[in-house]
Image: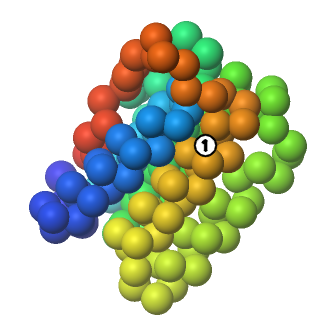
Amino acid sequence: MVRFFPKEDESKIIDAIKSAEQHTSGEIRVHLEDNFKGEVLPEAARVFQKLGMHKTEARNGVLIFIAPEKRKFAIIGDKGINEKVPPNFWQEERDLMAQHFKKGEYTAGVCAVIEQIGDKLKAYFPYQSDDENELPDDISYS
């Protein structure tokens, strides 16, 4: 299992998820994958399914998938999001994260992207008073 982020940085990322989800019914998860083989997008899609992210009521889950050893990442959203947003919706997030990662600012990059995703999703999936947190906010590893 990859331990890429120090404990205090994991806490910052989890806090960023909780903060973003206070403004949207969207569900955001971060997953770190250790030494996978193949292409990053199909692997991210597999993990998305494995984590049950497709089971949210509004189909509005977002996965930030990071493979530190391969120096690759992907950001993918579920069907409910992708049906409502423009085709290049995720490009700005990928670019922002890549900028931070190139400078070695991994935690800052993930937190900035989580904040930006939360801001963007609230236009499509605003927070409702009866919203339930459908997915865990912790970082998953495999």
Q: Which of 25 and 52 is in front in this view?
A: 25
Q: Position of residue 111 (x, y in %)?
A: 42, 61
Q: In which quarter of the image is the C terminus?
A: top left
Residue ID at (50%, 79%): 100
Q: Residue furthest bottom?
A: 103
Quarter location, residue 59: top right
Q: Mark 1 points at which residue?
A: 76
When the figure is inspected, residue 92 is found, relative to residue 49, above or below; the finding is below
Residue at 29 percent across and 48 percent down: it is 14
Regarding residue 140, the answer to whether it shows in the image is no
Could you say where residue 133 lies in the image, as x and y percent from the top left?
38, 22
Seen in the image, is 120 located left or right of residue 71?
right
Q: Label 1 amino acid? A: Ile
- Residue 39 position, x and y percent, is 57, 53
- Left or right: residue 44 versus residue 18 is right
The crowding category of the residue bearing disc 1, from other C-alpha atoms within 10 Å (few below 14, some 14 to 19, many at least 20), is some
Up-down: is 6 above or below 125? below
Residue at point 40% right, 45% down? 19
